[in-house]
Amino acid sequence: MNESTDLYTVDSLLIRYEGKDADRHVIDMMALGESMQGFGRIYSVVGHFVATGSYAKQWQALEVRAFATEPKAKCFQLAVELQSVMQSQLMSGLAGSIITAIVSYIVARNSNKGEEMKHLRELLEKQLDSQTGRNDKTTDRLLLTIEKLAESLRSSLKQAVSPVGQTCRSIDIIPSPESGAQPISIDQATKDAILADDDDAELTGLKSFVVIITEMDRERGTAKVRLLGQDGGKRPNYTALHLRP
């Protein structure tokens, strides 16, 4: 990004840390630094998506940057502005509301809140439809990209929520009034769900596989099998397995 270029404000918001140390208008610097790094990554990546319609995996490729402005002495609060060298055409007029909706979806998906995810996805679909002229193909592509964002930003979200339970009781993300979006609140229960092991975070549906028995040993009661992919292809997902009754 060219530092000499005038920046366009994509969105603004407040990140408020409440409870514990934050009630004294202070916060642990180590926890705050980790949290700001996580939120900075999340909002820069989501802001870039809203501005360009694409997902940038490399930090250098981001067209949107998150800036922290002067802190306010209300609990412990930071104002954040997302700025870019370019003005969003894809989401013109909806930047604030859709950024908040995407971040809300990222939080809900990574804390395994099924009903909230469903509601937010429906909201995102309506917002995207209005911007793409109900182009189903484009809307589906953007929704798929949002899913990728939610998955790839999980580690950043873990960083963002690190102060909860340590130096504050909760984190509230307050969108600008102009966006009309609802605040996001992250408490200890939400943090615990975000930090849960990936294997426990979400159950997947049943999958079918094809198993070919390549060798049998009746004396030992064992068999050597080959586990194929779901499509039944000849390339195995795993090397040979030994089964014992």
Image: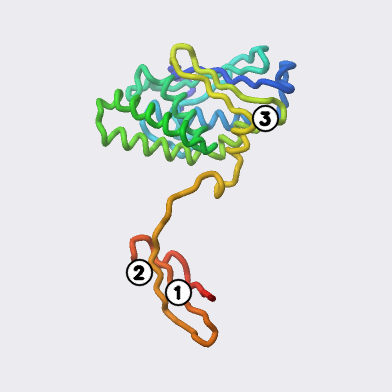
- Reading the image, the residue beneath label 1 is 225
Q: Position of residue 86 (x, y in %)?
A: 39, 22
Front of the two marks 2 and 1: 1
Q: Tell me, yes or no, if residue 7 can be seen here.
A: no
Mark seen at residue 163: 3
Comparing 24 with 79, the one in front is 24
Q: Earlier in the sequence, mark 2 or mark 3?
A: 3
Q: Which residue corresponds to the image point at 25% horizontal and 28% vertical from the top-left?
A: 134
- Reading the image, the residue beneath label 2 is 234
Mark seen at residue 32: none
Q: Tell me, yes or no, if residue 104 can be seen here.
A: yes
Three-letter code for the amino acid on which mark 3 is drawn: Pro
Label 2 SS: loop
Q: Earlier in the sequence, mark 3 or mark 1?
A: 3
Q: Position of residue 117 (x, y in %)?
A: 45, 33
Work out how far the residue at label 3 is from the one at label 1, CA to CA, in angstroms.
49 Å
Q: Which residue corresponds to the image point at 66% horizontal and 29% vertical from the top-left?
A: 164
Q: Position of residue 170 (x, y in %)?
A: 64, 25
Three-letter code for the amino acid on which mark 1 is drawn: Val
Q: Which residue corresponds to the image point at 68% horizontal and 16% vertical from the top-left?
A: 75
